Amino acid sequence: MSQQDNFAGGFFLGALLGGVVGGILGTVLSSKLANEDLAALSPEEKADKLKKKVIKAATPADMEVARRKLEGKIAQLNEAIDDVRQQLGSVNGAPANVEKKPSTSHEV
């Protein structure tokens, strides 16, 4: 039994260590390749690449569209949460449509 435990622990440790080393190696190599590509370009070509990157950046209109989509998704999520609350409330015997009243400080 102890050999199986050692194998499983070693396997997971090796997978974790391999993933970390591979991630670091990939990041370093990709950044070096990107720098070599830029070094081979003329100043005009570098400027063109930079302009393309700036153009690809999000504009205020793009951010507004993304914000509206996100608000829609949040509304859908809130509806789903309310549905689950109602289902769980009816399963547990509590009334499904009862909402909490906000507490006020002047109630006795």
Image (cartoon, helix red, strand yellow):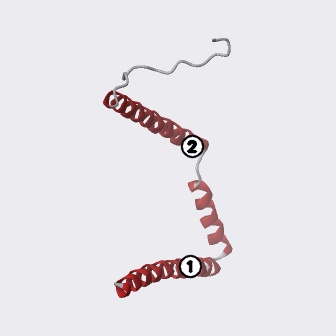
1 or 2: tag closer to the N-terminus: 1
Q: On screen, 66 above or below 95? A: below
Real-space Cα distance between discs 1 and 2?
32 Å
Give residue 24's mark: 1
Give residue 4's mark: none
Image quarter (top left, top right, bottom left or bottom right) of the C terminus? top right
Q: On screen, 58 above or below 100? A: below
x and y, in percent, of residue 66 in the image = 52, 42
x and y, in percent, of residue 11 in the image = 41, 82
User: Who's the residue at 43% across and 81% down the image?
Assistant: 9
User: Who's the residue at 44% across and 80% down the image?
Assistant: 15
Q: On screen, 102 above or below 6? A: above
Q: Label 2's element?
A: helix
Q: Is residue 26 found left or right of 3 in the rendered image?
A: right
81 vs 50, nearest the viewer: 81
**Residue beneath label 2, please?**
63
Give the label, 1 or 2, closer to the camera. 1
Q: Is residue 82 found left or right of 67 in the rendered image?
A: left
Image quarter (top left, top right, bottom left or bottom right) of the N terminus? bottom left
Location of residue 78 by image quarter: top left
User: Who's the residue at 31% across and 31% down the image?
Assistant: 91
Labels in figure, total: 2
Q: Label 1's element?
A: helix
67 vs 84, nearest the viewer: 84
Location of residue 31 by image quarter: bottom right
The disc labelled 1 sits on which kind of residue?
A: Ile
The disc labelled 2 sits on which kind of residue?
A: Met
Location of residue 90 by image quarter: top left
